[in-house]
Structure formats: C-alpha cells, structure tokens
Amino acid sequence: MENLSRRKVLTLGAALGIAGMAGTTGTAWAWSGKGSIAGSGTGADPFQVWDDTADAVAKALLAEGRIPAVNTAWQGWIDNNAPLPAGMPDYLVAYLRQVNKLPSWADPAKLAASEKLYTRLSSYLFVSETLGSGIMSTVIPREARAVYWSAGGADMKQRAAKTFTFGYDLHNSKAWAPDGHFVVTANKTRLVHAVVRNLLPTSAKYQDGADQPKPISNGDILRTFHSVATFARSNMLKWNIALSTAEQDADLHAWQVALHLLGVQEQFIPQTWADAEAQAQQMLWPVLGPTDEGVSLAKTLLGYIEKPTLGLDSGFVNELVRYLLNDQMGDWLGLPRDYAQAALIRIEWPAYVAFREGASKIMPGSFSLFDQFVRGISMLYLNNGTSPTQTPITLPTANRPG
Ligand code: HEM
C-alpha cells in the first residue's frame, strides 16, 4: 500500500465513491454556497456535477456524425448578436437558443467597466495568463491529462492559439457588445468541453489514470478559473497596479458571467473576491502536482514562446515562469536554473511595471528587454485576435491519435 501513487489513491477514492475525494485532497467539499452568487447551495460537490444538457447535445452530434458539418456551419458565427447559423441540427439550435444569451443578473454597467479595465491591463493580463496560468495548467493534474489525451494535445500550437481566442475575446474593448465575440466564443467552448466529456472516457490511455467518471466537472472549471482570474488579480495587486474596488468588482463580474456561459451552476460561482480566494485555497493550490503529460505539455508550450516566436533566451523564459509561479512548480517541470536571469527578473520586473505605470520615474536598465517581452506576448494574442484567420474554435471528432 505504501507505494501507491497519488494518482492511484485518487483513482481508488473515485472508484470507492469517497465523497469529494476525486476533486479535492481527500476532504469533503466544504465551501459554502452562501458565498455563491445564488446566495445558497444544495451542498452538492461541484466535482460531482457536469453539464447534462450540453453533454447530451454533444453525445447526439457525435453519434450522428454531425460534428464536421457543425464546424463548417458555425465558422462564420462570431458576433454576439449574429443569428444562429443555418445547417445545424434542430436540437443544437434549440439548445443554443436557450444558452446563447446573458443571464438575467448580468450587469451591463459592470461588463462595460470590465472592457475598459481589460483594455488598460491587457499586456499584464497576457503575461499572467501565458507564462503564468498557461504553464500552471500543466501542473493541474486533471487538466494536463485531459488536454494531453484529447485531439488538441497533439498540436499544442494550435490549441494554444484557440485558447488565446478566448482570452482575446474576453479582454477586448467590446467583448460584450453586439458586435463583440465573447458570448459566442464561450458557448463554442462550452460545447467543446461537452464533446470532450463524451470522447475522453473512450480513450484507454486517458482512462488509465482517470479519477472521475468523466472530465471537466463544474469543480474542474472553477479550478481553472482560479488559476487564471484569481491568480491574475493577485499578480496585479502584487505588482502594485492601481485597481479600484469598482474595477475589481467588474473583473469578477465578467468572470461570473463567463463561468455561467461555460455551464457552471450559480450555487458554485463565488460572489466576492474573498469567496473566490477561499474557494481557490480549497480547490486549486492543494492539488497541484507533476504528471508525465503535464511535463511534456509544458516543454512544448515553452518551446513555442522562446526563440522561434519571441526571440527570447530560454533562461529568461524559464526564470520568468518560476517568478510568476514558484520554484516548486518550476522544479516539477524540470525548468533549468539561470540564477543571473532570476536575480534580474526579481529586481527589475517590479521596477519595469512601476515605471510603466508612472509610479516611478526611474527607468530600469533592462526596460527594453521587458518591453520586448511584454510586446511579444501581447502580439501572440493580438495577431491571433485581429488576423482574418483567427484560429476558430472547433468541436473535436476524436481523441489524441495513437
Ligand atoms: C478546449 C477554455 C476549463 C480541458 C477549450 C477551448 C477553450 C477552453 C477556449 C477551445 C480551444 C480548443 O479547442 O483547444 C477553457 C476555460 C476554462 C476551461 C476558459 C475554465 C475557466 C477546462 C478544464 C479542462 C479543460 C477544467 C480539463 C480538466 C479542455 C480540453 C479541450 C478544451 C481537453 C479540448 C482540446 C482539444 O481540442 O482537443 N477550453 N477551458 N478545460 N478544454 Fe478547456
């Protein structure tokens, strides 16, 4: 028994139906629904809740072999106010009519404030989301394994570009406007996840280490939300970027609506940042750890970000990842050390942000290095977002080949 790996223990826990064990660290789900936007909860564990309606639609699309036709039909369906495209089965149209809209509690003023905020902060958000959250996703064991064994895991460049589409559309000056894209992008993403929930359980290699009956539960989506949004907010505060209370509210509100559009129930969506922090303490930080799949994904992703794309030294990139995450995560991923770059980043990144934000008049010596980096990261998003060939989000038809 003493040699049981963590993954095997989790698998065993799931098989035995030990409540909450599959999603947390062996303790039952304890976050109170009182801290949710619903104001109360049924006591359900979000790691035991999936997205039944979307999953049934995806199941039918797969069974009827309709996915390629749907991908073709919805290619030009991009704007929030665009009519649903022709050429899709009736049950998909009926489903989208129900979900492709803002919830009644969405606050247009807060959404408009989030557009302004994200436009102001976009370059910092892109840094936090690529080298921070993007690499953190490879040490979230369930996410790393799901991504690796799904079709997109075999082509991480394209997969990353598709994820950029989501980030770009959310952090856009007209994300929620009639001619913005985010509502449609979120709905497409929700359906991708539903297809993945039907496909991955048929992958023997994925199932070999699976610890839940199907992937991407409500809890898993919230965990990723914390690794992106809760983490980004804490970075902005750590870097002394001015954020008013109203701006922080707007940021959270945009994500509350985004989580709703991704199929997360209101009883699990945090009401305040304090509630979000409490949830992240329970569901994100304790479960991080290395997997073979995650180490492989991180290597591939970092390879795209370094020399070929941004002309950056790998020592700089590796140390920036360690700075954004921490040394334990860097060690899990086997990122080689470069102590000179580490010292430079620790001292000069805060100085760079302070100078850029007008909080300091002293331009750090490495200003141009950081500026090249920040601009390069932003271009990764913007090229993808503004190019006429913006990588479209498509439904997969199979798992990772081989
Ligand atoms: C696909 C975003 C949570 C696993 C996608 C896509 C986006 C996205 C934009 C479409 C791009 C693509 O096809 O690659 C998000 C967001 C999340 C979230 C914003 C939460 C806030 C999760 C979680 C998991 C997951 C928790 C697994 C545990 C996947 C997989 C795909 C996918 C396997 C399909 C990749 C393929 O094409 O084969 N996600 N995701 N996602 N996501 Fe997520």
Image: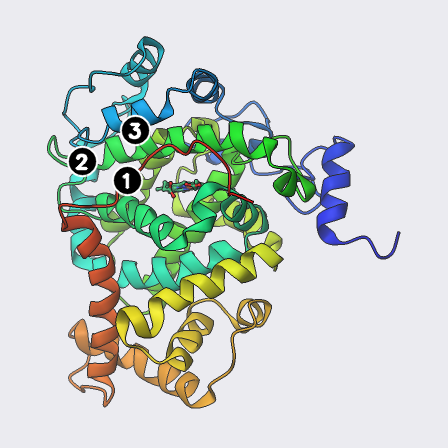
In the figure, is residue 200 to the left or right of 17? left
Q: CA distance from mark 3 to mark 1?
A: 27 Å
Along the line of sight, the residue nearer the viewer: 273 or 188: 188
* Cβ–Cβ under 8 Å for marks 3 and 1: no
Numbered disc in front, either 3 or 1: 3
In the figure, is residue 284 to the left or right of 151? right
Categorize mark 2 by other alpha carbons within 10 Å: few (<14), some (14-19), many (20+): many
Position of residue 251 measured from the top left corner of the image (x, y, whole percent)? 28, 46
Position of residue 352 measured from the top left corner of the image (x, y, whole percent)? 24, 79
* Cβ–Cβ under 8 Å for marks 1 and 2: yes
Residue 102 sits above or below residue 130 on the image: above
Element on which disc 1 rests: helix
Q: Amino acid at mark 2?
A: Trp
Residue located beneath label 2 in the image: 176
Q: Mark 3 or mark 2, which is nearer the start of the sequence?
A: 3
List the single residue furthest toward the left: 179
Q: CA distance from mark 2 to mark 3?
A: 23 Å
* Cβ–Cβ under 8 Å for marks 2 and 3: no
Q: Amino acid at mark 3?
A: Asn
Q: Residue at x 28, y 76 (%)?
A: 311
Q: In this orientation, does residue 123 appear?
A: no
Q: Residue at x 24, y 69 (%)?
A: 374
Categorize mark 1 by other alpha carbons within 10 Å: few (<14), some (14-19), many (20+): many
In the picture, the quarter occupied by the C terminus is top right
Q: Quadrant of residue 347?
A: bottom left
Residue located beneath label 1 in the image: 254
Q: Residue at x 20, y 19 (%)?
A: 84
In the figure, is residue 335 to the left or right of 304? right
Q: Quadrant of residue 213?
A: top right
Residue 264 sits above or below residue 116 on the image: above
Q: Mark 1 or mark 3, which is nearer the start of the sequence?
A: 3
The circle drawn on residue 71 is 3
